[in-house]
Structures are given as C-alpha cells and as structure tokens.
Amino acid sequence: MTEQGSGSNHDPLAISDAWGHQADDQIEAAALISFEAALETSWLRRGISREAFLSELLRDLHQRHLIPLLAILPRKWKQTSAVLPDHLRGLGAVLEGGLISPLMLAALADDLQHLIPATEATQPSRADALQKWSALTIQASETAHLLPGSLEAWRRQAKQLPDSAREGNNSSSDARSGLRSLGAGLVWRNHGLQHRQTAESRWSNTLLAQVLNALGSNRLLKSAGCYGSRSAPFSFEGTTSPRELIALLSDRGWTCRARIRASVASFGMGASCPNDPKTGSAWSQVPLGVAYRTGLLRQDQELEALLPHCSFELELIPPDGTACTLLQYYQSTEGLNGWAAMNDLHRPWQNDRANGTVAYPGQVFRAGQLLLALDLCDLMAAVHNTAADLGHLHAGGYGALGFCIDSTALLEQALTGRSHLFPLTLGGLWRERLHRQLDQLLQDGLNPGIGNDAEDCVARYRNALRALPSDLILQGDACAPALERLVASQPRHSPFHVVRRLNGEDSLTPPA
C-alpha cells in the first residue's frame, strides 16, 4: 500500500491515500513512498547531519542530466550554496524557493549557455544535432551498429541484440548510468520494476527510430554541407522518407497510428528504497516529478502542476499482431529534434498507457493525417537541428528552441489548428529565428515534400509558429483556454495530490 499520512496538500508531490484502490495501480508490484519520506528515512538511517546527507545527495551534480534534481527535491530540503557546484549556485538559489514558472523556464532556456560550465560548453558535442539526426549507425556502448536497410534485416538485427544494449535494458538499471546511492536505503534506480516489452522489442524500437531519423534527413541532401559526405539518400525497404515507409507498411496490413502523449516528467530519473534494509528483498518506488507554478488562478489560488513530458507517440503493429513498435517524436535532452524509442521502465504511477497515468488529449492520427504528421516531423527536425548547429546552441537547442512540450504542441498546432498542451514557453525571439532558418533552408534546396503537399506542409509549420499560444504571462481572455490545456495535459489518474486537485478530486483548500 502507499504510505499513510502523506496526504498533505501543502506538498505538491504528496501521495494520495486514494492511490491503490484500482487494480491498475499495481501496488503489489510497485508500492509507493513519497520522495520526502524516502529522504527523511534514509537521512535518519545514515545517522549524519541533514546538511551532510544533502551534500552527498547532490555530489553528482557535475553531471548535466542531474540538474532537474534541484527542482525535484521537496521544498523542506533546501539546496544551500555550500553543497552545490559553483556553476549551479545561482540556479539553486532560484529553484530552492519554489519559483519555477513558465516564465522562469523560458528565461532559463534562453540563458542556458551561461549556466553550463565553460569546459563543457566548448566540447564538440555541442553542435551535433544534425549528425545525431542523420546518423546511419546506432551506438551501443563502444560499438557502432549500421542501420538495417530492409524489414528483414531489421528483424534479424533486432534478434542479434548486442550485450551492451541488453545490459542497458536490464530491469534493475536506470536510464541514467553512473549514479551513486543517495544514502543508506535510497538508490537512483527503480528496483523490482519490469519493462512491458522484451529486450528484443526495445532494441527493435531503437533501430527503427533512427531509421526514421535517417530517412527524414534525406530532405537535406540538396542543402550543401548540411551533413557529412552522404551523396545518396538513405533507403529502407526501398523507401526514402518516413511517409513512404509508413504508407508501405499500411499497404502490407500493418496498423499504424499516432497520438499526442503527455505524462509526468521525471527526466529519466528513478528512485526506490528497500522495505527491509537488511535483505533488500522488497522495494518501495519513489514517484518523482517537477512541480511548478502555472500562473493561473482557481478559487483565487494560483494552481500548481507537474511538468509533463510530451511527445508524438507512434505505434506500429504488424499484421500477425506480435509485439508492436513504439516510437516518439520530440525535442529531446539528448541533443536533437527527432524520433526516439519508447523504452522506459514500466512505472504504473507515471507511464502506463492504459490506466490513465498517461494523458492522450486530442484525436488518433491515421492514414493521410498520419502521413502529413510525418512530413511535418521531418520539416521541423530539419529546421530545428540546423538552427541548433548553425547557432552553436547547447544540447541541440533544447529549451531555447522549445522543450518537448513545445515541439509536440507545434506539431499538433500544425496538424489540427490547436494544441492541448501546457505550459508553452517557446519565445518570440526563437520563433523568429526558426522562421528565418526555414526560409534559408528552402532557399538552399530543402525538399519539404511533393507538389501541393509540400506547400501545405510549409504553410502549416509557418502558421503554427505564429499561432501557437504562449504561456509566459497569462491574463484576461487567455486564461480560460490555458486552463483547459493545463488540465488536458495532466494525467486522468495519478497518485500525486497536485494532479488530483487539478482534476477536481481533492479540495483546493489545504486543511487547517
């Protein structure tokens, strides 16, 4: 069962006692304990000062992907400057006061270059979004694997799972490697959880995601010097674009569909602690999320929410109904705009595709609408990745050119004329730069599609950049539709009190 007495509405990450009453909550396999309770328990077990424990907790913050931990920490655990690396003390001072808001996210993204250590900012990987997008290989540990060129080769290569990929898919591992224990009994892994798909299926997802990226990058062949020495289009099963490939699969009886997806973001981090510290035989899972101020009022109180991870989820099911391929398109922290495998550990409180912890606002895209969506993904990836490289943007432009939320919302806006997602932080300066990058690519020979479809694709993207809402400062007539988007992009079912309050399940007024 979930921990008792954790239901204070003062803590947005508190776990509701109502969680666990549905079979799909799967508390037998994944009993929950709040992050704050796990920290308190581990600190007491260590028998050291809170400051010393916090210092140990944050000692890996030289790793850039751990920066979100500053925001995930409960408010009672303040990040004093003494335990932070020098280059993060200013950021810690902002985040420890609980000041995250859409406006703050946009400001941090715009100024990201100045928050990263100078030595890291000068690394060659800073400008490799195009290389990652157009790569014809997949890196697994120290080995580069060539992409398959056909469905048969893809299936065969998926069965020949490299040991490095098999180790990376181990259910006791977390996506973030090299992290130490957070103290006695608290570790940076979700021990005891399983993947919904087999290791072979996950490697299959990884391969096909990069196949779609490489096919999409064919559009840049006419743009001189955009990527490497490739002189001929990459081909897969005789196709040279994602549109052609999905159309081919549909003709062969595959079920191909996609949806806008939103779930609570944990930035790839997981945590758990043993119920019995002596044996470690049973683990409680620690749900993680980043709470933020929305800038929206309800009953004269500013609403809080949890930052979502958003993407365009593509599901491909073969005619025989065997294991499906799961992919997602978004602007990623990995440093590119494009496709990635959907290979996360199954966390029933966060990313279960059936129990309501993942929100699917809007419609299902099939047939012609799906093909248009694929063209738009290619166009946006070409524009965003070239803008990131030519502008020498850190992390492939992540944040400055939009977070995962913004890239997914841009796609939905272009497809349907509206978006269901919140918060949207893509600033005017960066929208103008994306407009100009599109113009330059078209002038250089970018291939946006065929005939009228190409013109329609470009026009839709231009209009989406202009019409996509901005949630930096909300007032007047903008508040009601923003509130609708906020609720639509939160889970329908969640253990977090803050989500239940947004859905009207818990009172907005804290108890006296």
Image (spheres, rainbow, N blue to C red):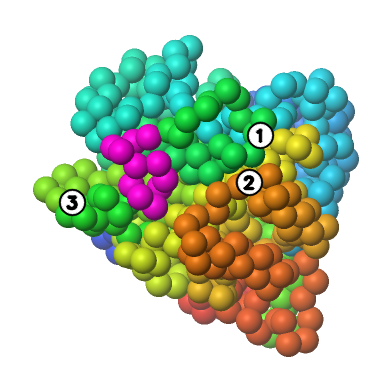
Q: Earlier in the sequence, mark 1 or mark 2?
A: 1
Q: Is residue 271 visible?
A: no
Q: Name the one closer to the observer, 99 or 485.
A: 485
Q: Name the one closer to the observer, 368 or 143.
A: 368
Above-or-below relation of 86 to 371: above
Above-or-below relation of 424 to 396: below
Q: Earlier in the sequence, mark 3 or mark 1?
A: 1
Q: Quadrant where the C terminus lies?
A: bottom right
The amino acid type, in three-letter code, at marker 1 is: Ala
Residue at the disc numbered 1: 224
Callout 1: few (<14), some (14-19), or many (20+) C-alpha neighbours within 10 Å? Answer: few
| Residue depicted at x 71% and y 40% | 388
Q: Name the one closer to the observer, 339 or 276.
A: 339
The amino acid type, in three-letter code, at marker 3 is: Arg
Q: What is the distance, in whole Å, between disc 3 and disc 1 at their CAs? A: 36 Å
Q: Which residues are magenta?
A: 235-245
Left/right placement of residue 392 relative to residue 159 reads right
Q: What is the distance, in whole Å, between disc 2 and disc 3 at their CAs? A: 33 Å
- Residue 96, numbered circle: none
| Residue depicted at x 55% and y 54% | 448
356 is within the stretch colored magenta: no
242 is within the stretch colored magenta: yes
Q: Residue 100, percent across and down?
A: 75, 56
- Residue 252, numbered circle: 3
Residue at the disc numbered 2: 445
Callout 3: few (<14), some (14-19), or many (20+) C-alpha neighbours within 10 Å? Answer: few
The amino acid type, in three-letter code, at marker 2 is: Gly
Q: Main secondary structure of the magenta part?
A: loop
Q: Residue 272, percent across and down?
A: 47, 36
Q: How many marks?
A: 3
Question: Are discs 1 and 2 less than 8 Å apart at CB?
Answer: yes
Q: Secondary structure at mark 3?
A: loop
